[in-house]
Amino acid sequence: GDSVTQMEGPVTLSEEAFLTINCTYTATGYPSLFWYVQYPGEGLQLLLKATKADDKGSNKGFEATYRKETTSFHLEKGSVQVSDSAVYFCALLRYNTDKLIFGTGTRLQVFP
Amino acid sequence: DTGVSQDPRHKITKRGQNVTFRCDPISEHNRLYWYRQTLGQGPEFLTYFQNEAQLEKSRLLSDRFSAERPKGSFSTLEIQRTEQGDSAMYLCASTPGGRERYEQYFGPGTRLTVT
């Protein structure tokens, strides 16, 4: 079945460091791919999305590129801030369904 | 605030009791979803509605679980005869129809603890 695999956390970085959180997926067809973020005490928020191969989603300095050949959608940010500390979830949505399939989440901790 | 709202935010109940949660989607969003999130895991799909019609149910949704959306607006999720394994965060999400249905907007969740 469809699945999403994320790197285990926590990821601990100093402020202004470069961030990569790996995400790979298994799915039939051509899913849409998403990154959601969950800040402490808050609900899930859509961070960015890509709906077809080679699309790049971007928002708030975060980027991820839909790589069909490697079935990956890695999240990157050039310079993280303390306020980026949160749990990040990679997810997919198969084209003919409406249910999101999530990875297990990766906790990011950024220290000043 | 025009986001998805859920009530209550926290619920503690004893094993064997029934509980009901409510979700109010974003106005005019015709699709509504329920997910369950256990500690250290990503959300797992439970069920979803288009207007008042329940279109899909996960195998996770045992016969102790029932969801309704009677007028195509708010939705309720009821768990009968709760078990300790039901302890989780229950999330609701909504989307508009058409091309925008891929973006699901989540509520803050209801955290259920079964003692």
Image (cartoon, coloured by chain):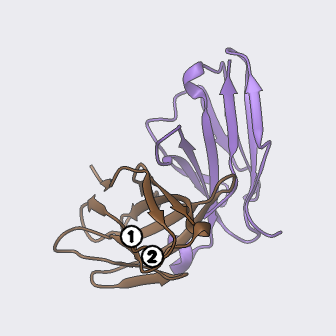
Chain colours: A brown, B purple
Which corner quadrant of the image does residue B87 belong to? top right
Q: Is residue B21 left or right of residue A47?
A: right
- Chain under disc 2: A
Q: x%, y% of residue B36? A: 55, 42
Disc 2 residue crowd, few under 14, some 14–19, many 20+, Cα 10 Å: many
Q: Residue furthest front?
A: A112
Q: Looking at the rendering, in which quadrant would you find the N terminus of chain B?
A: bottom right
Q: Which residue position holds label 1? A: A33
Q: Mark 1 and mark 2 in contact (Cβ < 8 Å)?
A: yes
Q: Earlier in the sequence, mark 2 or mark 1?
A: 1
A16 left or right of B2 in image? left
Q: Secondary structure at mark 2?
A: strand
Q: Toward the viewer: A97 or B111?
A: B111
In the image, residue B91 above or below residue A13: above
Q: Amino acid at mark 2?
A: Lys
The residue lying at 56 percent from left, 52 percent from top is: B48
Taking depth in this image into account, of B90 and A20 the one nearest to the observer is: A20
Tell me the amino acid under the disc marked 1: Leu
Residue B4 visible within the image: yes
Instruction: Give the Cα separation between the discs numbered 2 and 1.
Output: 6 Å
Q: Position of residue A82 (x, y in %)?
A: 59, 67
- Residue carrying label 2: A49
User: Are the residues under marks 2 and 1 on the same chain?
Assistant: yes
